Image (cartoon, rainbow, N blue to C red):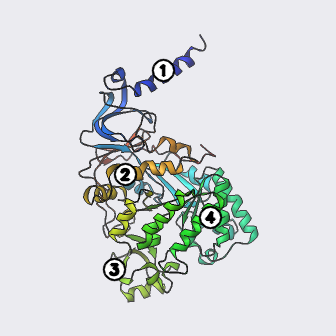
Amino acid sequence: MSGWPVRGAALLLAAAAMLAELPAGASQAAAVHDIVYAGARAIDPETGLDAVRNIAVDGDRIAAVSAAPLKGLRVIDARGLIAAPGFIDIHSHATTREAAGYQAKDGVTTRLELEIGTWPVSAWYEAKRGHELLNYGTSAGHTALRYFIQKGEGAAGLYALRDPMEKFGAGEADEPLSDASADRLAALLEQGVREGAIGIGSGTQYAPGVTRREMLEVTAIAASTATCLFTHIRYGSLVEPDSSFEAVQESIANAATTGACVHVAHINSMAMRDAPFMAALMRAAHARGVDITTETYPWGGSVDAVRSHFFDPGWERRWGVGVDDLQSRSTGKRLTQVEFDALRAGTGDDGVIMHMNSEATIAALLADPSVLVASDGGRIEGPNGHPRSAGTFARVLGHYVRDSKTLGLADALRKMSLMPAQRLEAFVPAMKRKGRLQPGMDADIVIFDPHSVGTRATYGDAARYSEGFRYVMVNGVVVVDGGTLVDDVSPGRPIYSKYRS
């Protein structure tokens, strides 16, 4: 008799699994689930399901996706709405609770800081435990770590790294590493990955002192740990030398040489009108066995600082823009040459949005089947921030799917859920349970109205919630309920690499 409870529990679990798969009319309707979404148009990017279904959730998992009626302690009428896997944003600098609310209202259930990363890794995860609205994870920050090492690994270095997007001191960023520092960098990057970091993040363009050999060696660490390098490539420029083309070729060569996974961040804001060609170049390399991918966000502007390296003399030709394409993040107005010169000289807030991409460029990137969607969003910084922080995924669904018909609904959902999950799942175990609307998967679910979904954020009025997402669920907990953000829940869980799962 002592073995009965264990055997009984195993039998109950097996029965529950079988019931979840039963066809219409079977006895699964007798089960009473925690939550049931009734009558939704369910779209699963992996199986190709696109049909009216009832979706049951028990605890933190999807229990059933069924044509048969289902009973629940709470039954939500989802007729006329679309149910899909929650969106996975692999490029999010949105670290605050406020920003998480905007992302939840945009359909995001998992946000990952992979392009820049952070340090120290364990401390970053520990500080978030139990406090997060959305699932969260980070890479080990190459650019941050090299600065930390150059500052002597002391309190000053740690203070400067309190924010992953903190601008590094120009002196350190411009300097190559010594051999001893390079060895120390390698050891700490490996340590970060083994503490659970999702690969290595490198803001290469922010640190001109990063040599090509250093980048090759960092890519090799991603290969040796069987994770991935997430890179803000070395150059953003339409002209040679030091062009985006050369930077993409460097990433392809490093991936081919080391056998590493390499993911290039926001190719739209690095290659401008040449971005579709760069995406095609990476797609061709991938078809030949090089593990390289890229992403885009659905906006034509990027965020920059006038006093950065990006605006060194000749910037107009490199970026393909002029002063009147720069919008102040302080005033919301386009700059004049006098205002630009004053900011460059060191007076005033020099943050700008640079409008460098046409609608045709963004549409071409979204239509490319190999390009996934990510936000590059950050903190919500008032009306003159970048609208991508509040409205990336809804903009894809509203503007590019419904209105312009640039891509189909199923393709868009795949780019925002399944594709990022599959990009990471080889070394991030949790991703095997995300990006799918299937029994046994994590209950990260979005329910939205296809007729009203869209972004309200725009340039000059950026701090606006997206609309159309009626219900958003994270690990079985409703965080957007009837279109209203739920304030008193924190269901987000850490997402680790395979070394700490």
Image mark for residue 26: none
- Label 4 sits on residue: 254
Residue 377 occupies quadrant? bottom left
Horizontal arrangement in the rendering, residue 104 relative to residue 501 (left or right)? left
Is 54 located above or below residue 102 in the figure? above
Tag 1: residue type?
Leu
Q: Secondary structure at mark 1?
A: helix
| Residue found at the far front of this picture | 288
Closest to the observer: 488 or 441? 441
Closest to the observer: 391 or 460? 391
Query: Where is residue 341 drawn, in percent x and y?
Result: 43, 88
Camera-nearest label, 1 or 2: 2
- Label 3 sits on residue: 334
Q: Earlier in the sequence, mark 3 or mark 4?
A: 4
Tag 2: residue type?
Asp
Crowd rating for badge 3 (residues with CA inside 10 Å; few <14, some 14–19, many 20+): some
Tag 3: residue type?
Arg
- Label 2 sits on residue: 411
Tag 4: residue type?
Asn
Camera-nearest label, 4 or 1: 4
Crowd rating for badge 2 (residues with CA inside 10 Å; few <14, some 14–19, many 20+): some
Q: Residue at x 64, y 64 (%)?
A: 145
Q: Secondary structure at mark 2?
A: helix
Q: Are marks 3 and 2 in contact (CB under 8 Å)?
A: no
Q: Is residue 266 visible?
A: no
Q: Quadrant of the C terminus?
A: top right
Q: How many marks?
A: 4
- Label 1 sits on residue: 12
Closest to the observer: 236 or 347? 236
